[in-house]
Amino acid sequence: MKSAMSPQSKLPDVGTTIFTVIGQLSAEHNALNLSQGAPNFSCQPSLIDAVAKSMRAGQNQYAPMSGVAALRRALSAKVEALYGCHYDADSEVTVIASASEGIYSAISALVHPGDEVIYFEPAFDSYSPIVRLQGAKPVPVRLSMDDFSIDWDEVASVINSRTRMIIINSPHNPTGAIFTQHDIDRLTALTRNTDIVILSDEVYEHVVFDGECHESMARHPELAERSVIVSSFGKTYHVTGWRVGYTLAPEALMDEIRKVHQFMVFTADTPMQYAFAEALADPQSYLGLADFYQQKRDLLVKAMHGSRFELLPTRGSFFMLARFNHFSPLSDDEFVLKLIRDHQVSSIPLSAFYSDNKPTGLIRLSFAKDDETLYEGARRLSGV
Ligand code: GLN
């Protein structure tokens, strides 16, 4: 439709997300999709049965704004059992319509115009635009290109009186790095006696490999006091399309987050909330996830053996980085396009996770795929 309007964009440099762009290209070229971090296999049939049951039982109207009570109670108990921190189910747990919504609500509620927000690049693509939409300044700190660890001295050098928030993400999308005790110690020391809020994106909390421990902010009382934790059922139960997640935060922070959440979506989907409350009763439904994805990681590594790619170690999440610049002069974007067009396999250029979009020589592969897809993907990548 023609319009006389030409609105002044709030995000003039932002296009459609890389996951959507690559997904469309992938479909056009009939490529095998190792790009988006979304499973191509189904969830437990019992979870679908539980949703159908709650729909039939009439749970089809608005849930309470903060979430279905049974689910908030189940989450509070789960987090206390796993990480040792008690969140009050009524005032410190909120069910949200996806982790994306939780991240938006938390930033929007807590970050003011002129504030600065530190985050780490490569980073999930939504953090920086959401900060900018508040009239605040995103301050990216680059992770080391060797092992994607955080240079805390650099973080210390960019903290100032305007720093309102630090966004962390462990296990990390897109690198698979995880927080260590050293990270916890440095973060604790750097934020002590400040009014910096930590926004901790923990959507891959149950996907940590090789027996290592997920360093949730909820394990560390001093950090928990200043943290908003965001997590998601989508990753944990293989239902990224259901758009249900949760946030945990001390009441004073949660009060503000709920003020935004209530006007953005009001509530998350009701029937799913009852189903997740039931699913959480079986801890194996989330505790088995690390082994499940570790097998997929190992399968992909083994199947890629002999390819020209150098695979970087991944300690958590369902992503793996693969280096190609020792055999191709192309930029990440060009290389990903070539893989889609000439080899019918899609991935994400790592440069998409940086604000400067400079070539990195790396692509991100998602191994949240059935084994057959992983074998076939590895076969196609080995032909490059
Ligand atoms: N979190 C997923 C990824 O990184 C999907 C994100 C999206 O499609 N917006 O691939």
Image (spheres, rainbow, N blue to C red):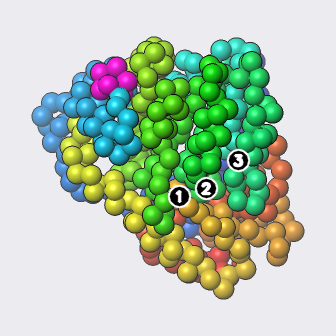
Which mark sits nearer the N-terminus, 3 or 2? Answer: 3
The magenta span reads 88-93
Badge 2 local density, few (<14 within 10 Å), some, or many (20+)?
A: many
Which mark sits nearer the N-terminus, 3 or 1? Answer: 3
The mark closer to the camera, 3 or 2, is 3
Which residue is farthest left?
Answer: 57
Q: Looking at the picture, which amino acid does disc 2 mark?
A: Ala
Q: Residue at x 56, y 61 (%)?
A: 315
Name the residue beneath numbered marker 1. 316
Is residue 323 depicted above or below 256 in this figure?
below
Q: Give how far apart the Cα atoms at labels 3 and 1 are.
A: 16 Å
Does the magenta stretch mainly form a helix, a strand or a loop? loop
77 left or right of 330 in image: left
The mark closer to the camera, 3 or 1, is 3
Q: Specify the quadrant of the image occupied by residue 278.
A: top left
Residue 139 in percent (x, y) is at 76, 32
Name the residue beneath numbered marker 3. 150
Q: Secondary structure at mark 2?
A: loop
Q: Which one is nearer the viewer's eye here, 342 or 117?
A: 117
Name the residue beneath numbered marker 2. 177
274 left or right of 325 in image: left
Contact between marks 1 and 2 (CB within 8 A): the answer is yes
Q: Looking at the picture, which amino acid does disc 3 mark?
A: Ile
Decide if ligand 1 comes within 8 Å of the CB at mark 1. Answer: no
Q: Specify the quadrant of the image occupied by residue 275.
A: top left
Q: Give how far apart the Cα atoms at labels 3 and 2 are.
A: 10 Å
Residue 303 in percent (x, y) is at 56, 81
